[in-house]
Image (spheres, grey):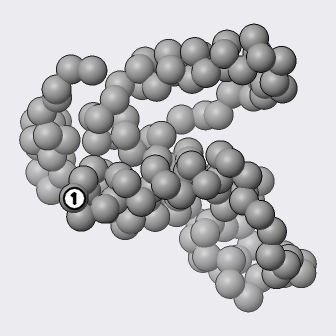
């Protein structure tokens, strides 16, 4: 992987002087102007409060988030992750689980911050899918939109 210029410098060259992408938070339909992620007090049914073991991919998502936002690495901030998640449209936000939101945000931010290119991420995911298929594991054919 080639060393890239810091993301802030690249964004400044692109005309975003602050280095912070413009928020794209969308309002939730029928919620009085609330943002998509602002669901507190809305009727979404009962909350499952039971404890459950995390799947391996969920544990890895949590570990990646901690590594990428830790003071020693600081590839991006938790606020950056929150911005990406809060900018999801209503349908995406409502149909994805907690860790699905986080892994998608991590993927998008490593590209946004120029740690990896989109092609590098897609190539690596193709390699992982192929390896799992050879081992007889079930592979999702779903494409996760950027």
Residue 22 on image: x %, y %: 33, 54
> Image point 30% across, 55% down: which residue?
76
Q: How many neighbours does mark 1 have within 10 angstroms: few (below 14), some (14-19), or many (20 or more)?
A: few
Residue 39 on image: x %, y %: 68, 77
> Image point 52% across, 63% down: which residue?
86
Q: How many marks?
A: 1
- Left or right of residue 58, residue 47 in this image: right
Residue 99 on image: x %, y %: 64, 56
Q: What residue is pinned by disc 1?
A: 72
Label 1 sits on a secondary structure element that is loop
Q: Is residue 31 above or below residue 98?
A: below
- Left or right of residue 45, residue 103 in this image: left
Q: Quadrant of the N terminus?
A: top left
Q: Quadrant of the C terminus?
A: top right
- Left or right of residue 43, residue 35 in this image: left
Residue 15 on image: x %, y %: 14, 41
Q: Looking at this view, is 53 or 9 the one in front?
A: 53
* Residue 29 can be seen in this image: yes
Choose top left, top right, bottom left or bottom right for residue 27. Answer: bottom right
Q: Looking at this view, is 86 or 49 the one in front?
A: 49
* Residue 91 can be seen in this image: no
Residue that extends furthest to the front in the rendered view of this protein: 135
Choose top left, top right, bottom left or bottom right for residue 70. Answer: bottom left
Q: Looking at this view, is 81 or 40 the one in front?
A: 81
Q: Is residue 88 above or below residue 137?
A: below
- Left or right of residue 58, residue 21 in this image: left
Q: Is residue 98 above or below residue 125?
A: below
Residue that extends furthest to the bottom in the rendered view of this protein: 41
> Image point 89% across, 81% down: which residue?
46
> Image point 84% across, 26% down: which residue?
138
Q: Is residue 29 above or below residue 87?
A: below
């Amino acid at each position: 992987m080639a060393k890239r210029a810091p993301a802030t410098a690249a964004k400044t060259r692109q005309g975003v002087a602050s280095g912070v992408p413009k928020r794209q938070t969308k309002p939730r339909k029928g919620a009085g102007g609330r943002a998509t992620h602002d669901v507190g007090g809305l009727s979404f049914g009962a909350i499952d409060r039971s404890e459950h073991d995390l799947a391996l991919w969920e544990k890895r998502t949590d570990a990646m988030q901690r590594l990428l936002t830790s003071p020693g690495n600081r590839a991006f901030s938790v606020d950056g992750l929150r911005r990406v998640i809060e900018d999801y449209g209503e349908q995406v936000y409502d149909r994805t689980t907690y860790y699905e939101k986080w892994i998608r945000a991590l993927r998008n931010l490593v590209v946004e911050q120029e740690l990896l290119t989109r092609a590098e991420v897609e190539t690596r995911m193709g390699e992982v899918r192929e390896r799992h298929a050879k081992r007889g594991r079930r592979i999702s054919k779903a494409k996760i939109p950027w």
